[in-house]
Structures are given as C-alpha cells and as structure tokens.
Image (tube, grey):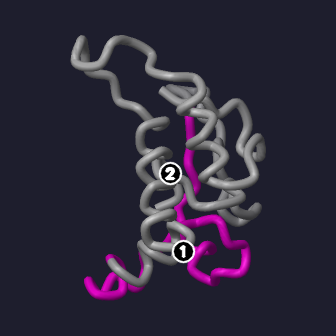
Amino acid sequence: MTIMESVDLYETLFDLANAVGARGPEFEPDSRFWYSDAGAEALGAIVEVIAGEPLDHFVQEELLEPLGMTDSFCYHDDEDPRRTRIASMFMGGVGQWKRLIDPAAGALYPFAWGSQSL
C-alpha cells in the first residue's frame, strides 16, 4: 500500500513520510497484515533524521560499502554509471509484455525512497 500517486508528488522523503502520518493507518493496528510501502517510507525518513543525512548516503556508507556491495546503489542519480547495467522492468502477460521501466531513460525517483530505490 502506498500513498504515492506520482513519483514527483513530494520534494523529500520527509515530506512523503509526513503525508503518510497525516493520512493515518489503513486499519486498526494488529488487526491484520498488509505490506506497506508507506511504512517503509516513514522508516526511511526516521533514518534520515537520526543519521542527519539522506537515506541513500546512509545506506551506501553504513551498509553497502562495509559489505563490499559495489554494484548495489539507490537508483535516483542519472549520473551514476552503474544505471546502464540495470535490467529493464516489464509488465504484462503472454503476448502483452510492455516495458514499464527503462533505466537508460533516466532515474524514476527524485530521491531515495524507503520502499524503493535499491
């Protein structure tokens, strides 16, 4: 579940997380399970506030670099040369496959999201 209607609706992850909070939960906590992009956005914003840096910098410096994961990155930077090696995403079915995301066309997200981007 996400509140995003378009990728450029919010200027920062913090703005997105505040919108999640303003909307409130979809159902009473502990009443059922539902995978939530919105919850991951809020968690990512908390990480940004506590770390004092953008989520993608934190992930790169504290997780990816120490683990030696040199080909993993938060894809929102059109200048990153690794983006040309990302596989395109397709959606559809037999005889109806369409390219959904083409990394060669540029980054999909304007900033690193908690639920996406990596």
Taking 17 as reference, is 107 above or below it? below
Q: Is residue 70 left or right of residue 91?
A: left
Q: Nearer the viewer, residue 15 or 100?
A: 15
Taking 118 as reference, is 21 above or below it? above
Three-letter amino acid code at the position of disc 2: Gln
Give the extent of the magenta segment.
Answer: 63-91
Q: Is residue 41 left or right of residue 70?
A: right
What percent of the width, then of the height, locates residue 98? 65, 37
Tag 1: Cα neighbours inside 10 Å, few (<14), some, or many (≥20)? few
- Magenta span main SS: loop
Taking 69 as reference, is 31 above or below it? above
Q: Residue at x 65, y 65 (%)?
A: 76
Q: Which residue is mark 2?
A: 116
Task: Name the element at disc 1.
Answer: loop
Three-letter amino acid code at the position of disc 1: Glu
What percent of the width, then of the height, locates residue 95? 58, 27
What percent of the width, then of the height, locates residue 55? 51, 66
Q: Which residue is mark 1?
A: 53
Task: Name the element at disc 2.
Answer: loop
Q: Is residue 67 magenta?
A: yes
Q: Residue at x 66, y 47 (%)?
A: 15
